[in-house]
Image (cartoon, grey):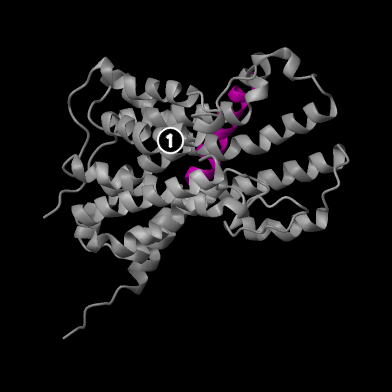
Amino acid sequence: MSKTPSGQFATLDGMRGVGAVLVVMAHGAIFFGGVKLTGGGPALVDAFFVLSGFVIAYSYEPRFAAGMNIRTFMVQRLIRLMPLAMLATLLGYITLATCVTIFNDDISHGAMIARLVPEMFLIPAVSLGANDDLFKFNVPLWSLLFELMVNVIYVLIVPLLTRRVLIATVVFSALILALLTIAHGTTDAGSELANAPIGMARAAFGFFAGVLIFRLAGSPTGPTKRTSWLGLIPMIALIPMALMPAEGEMKAFIQLCAVIAIGPVIVMAGQRIEPPRFLHPFMRWVGEMSFAVYVFHWPLLMVLRYYEEANPGALTSLGPIVGVVFLGVVVFVSWVLSTFVDAPIRKWLSQLVRRHRAASAPRPVES
C-alpha cells in the first residue's frame, strides 16, 4: 500500500520563489539596470517544469495507486491553477486596454474583446494584428497551457510509466527539444504560435524529468529530516544558471545544457536536503507566492514598457531603482490577490466539488 505524502519540500519551495523573481527580472531587464538574463534565463521556466513534475508525482502518485481517477486529478489541477490564471488574464486585458487608449496604440479594442474570453480559459486566440502571441494579455501563460497539456498526457499513461518507459520518455523528449532548438537557434521559445512546438517539448521534457527524479529518489513520502545551510545552495545555484552567457553560434547548445542537464541536477539536489527549520515557513510562503508572481508581473510590466516607449529614458535612466520598486509592487499585489481572492475561491470550489461528489455517490440499498 502506498503511503500518503506528508510535508512540503522547503528547498523546492524556495527554488520556486527565487526562480519567479529571476523570471520577473529577465522580462523587465531594462528596468533592472539591463541585467543580462537572456542566455540562461529561459532555463528558469524549464526548471519550473521539472519542479512541477517532481511535486505532482510526489503528491499524486500515491493517490493514483489508491484509486484516484483522471477526472479527479484534472479537477484538482484546474482548481489550483485556473482562478489565478483567469484573474491575471483579466488584469492583463484591463491593463492593455488602458495603455492602448492612453498611449494611442493602434490595437483594436474589438479584437482585444474577442480574445478575452478564450484567453481566460487558456485557449489561444492568435488574431490580434500581426502579433501571434498565444496569450496577448498575459504572455507567460503559454507555459501553463503546455504544462496542463502534459498533465493530461501524464495521467493517461501513468499506469504504463515504469522506470524504463519513463527514462525513454525523457530521452525522447530531450531529443525532440534539441532538434527543435537547433532549428530555431534558441530554447527561448514557446509563447508564439510559430514556435509553440518548442514550448510543448520544453514542458514535456521538464515535467517527465521531474517525475523521473521522483522515481530515482525512491518515490519519497516526505522531505528528508536532514537539515543544513547547504539546503540554500540549490536556490542560489539558480542565479548563476540564469546569468550564463549564451550568444552567437553556441547559444542553442549552452541553453540546451542548462535546460537538459543543469536545471534537473539542481532540482535533484534540492529534493535531497532541507534548510534549517526556522526558514521553512518563509520558504513555504515564497513557494506559494511564486505562481502568483509569475502570472501577475506581466500586466504591471506592460505599464512600464508603454510608459518607457512613450518617454524614452524616463524610467531606464533611474537604473535598478525602478526595477526594485516594480518587483516589490509585484510581490505585494501577488500576496493580496493570492491570499484574499485566489485562496477563498479555491476553497469554495473544493467544497463545491466535495458536495457534488457526496450528492452523486450511490446510496446503500435499504433492506
At 44% across and 21% down in the image, what residue appears?
A: 240
Residue annotated with mark 1: 288
The number of discs equals 1
170 left or right of 142? Answer: left
Residue furthest bottom as drawn: 367
Q: Please tell me which residue lies in front, 87 or 214.
A: 214
In the rendered image, the vertical position of residue 214 relative to residue 363, given as above or below:
above
Residue interval drawn in magenta: 325-345
7 left or right of 29? Answer: left
Type of residue at label 1?
A: Glu
Can see residue 335?
A: no
In the rendered image, the vertical position of residue 190 relative to residue 12, given as above or below:
below
In the rendered image, the vertical position of residue 75 relative to residue 14, given as above or below:
below
Q: Quadrant of residue 353?
A: bottom left
Q: Quadrant of residue 6?
A: top left
- Magenta stretch, main secondary structure class: helix
Residue 49, magenta (yes or no)? no
